[in-house]
Amino acid sequence: MEILLLGNEQLRQKAERIKTIDGEIKSLAEDLLDMMRRGKGIGLAGPQVGRALRIFVVHVDKDTPRVFINPSIIETSTETVKYEEGCLSVPGIWADVLRPKTVRVQAWNEKGRPFNLEAGGILARAILHEYDHLEGVLFVDRLPEHKRDWAMKKFEKSRPHVKGKPPQG
Ligand code: NI
């Protein structure tokens, strides 16, 4: 399993709902947490490792690792906030993204238990960023056009050897 990079069409698919939270899904959640840690990221979603399923993991500072399966965004604050984001699928690029300040989400964990969570700060940011991955959306899509052009150019320049090809690890 490897992390797919910007340019890979699999990152653009809408992920499918998970029908049964079984051992296979539990082990996918563990793999996602493992790869997230190795990449020193704070979140990772199924589509990023070529599994087009509605699952992501998040682990922000001073919090426990969390697994979200079939998440629904119930509510987001009208108040927005700008904060610098990066993505394991877009390595080397960081940019300010405007997002709702808080989010209320409903999901199931890896044990199949439903939960509700109201989050703010970095946790809200990570949840919204990862949720986007399930919809085939990357954080660069949320940048103003000039900033997105800058990000794409910088990304392509940094990896001319992988441009238009599968990632080389
Ligand atoms: Ni990401």
Image (spheres, rainbow, N blue to C red):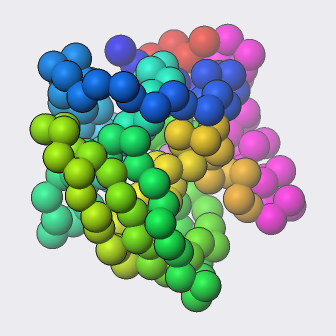
Q: Position of residue 135 (x, y in %)?
A: 61, 41
Q: In the image, is residue 31 above or below residue 138?
A: above
**Image quadrant containing the C terminus:** top left
Front position in the image: 154 or 99? 99
Residue 130 versus residue 104: which sits nearer the camera? 104
Q: Was residue 157 drawn as part of the magenta stretch in this picture?
A: yes
Relative to 11, is 79 above or below?
below
**Quarter location, residue 24:** top left
Q: Is residue 100 above or below residue 35?
A: below
In this view of the protein, which residue sits in the foreground, 160 or 57?
Answer: 57
Residue occupying the point 71% across, 59% down:
142
Q: Residue 40: percent from the left, percent from the top?
A: 30, 45
Q: Residue at the location (69% across, 27% down)?
A: 7
Magenta-drawn stretch contains 130: no
Residue 68, how many percent across, how many down?
31, 47
Name the residue nearer the viewer: 137 or 117.
117
**Residue 31 in sight in this render:** no
Question: In which quadrant will I find the N terminus?
Answer: top left
> In the image, is 47 to the left or to the right of 104?
right
Residue 123 can be seen, yes or no: yes
Image coords of residue 121 (percent x, y): 38, 77
Q: Which residue appears at 19% of the width and 22% of the height? A: 22
Magenta span: 144-165
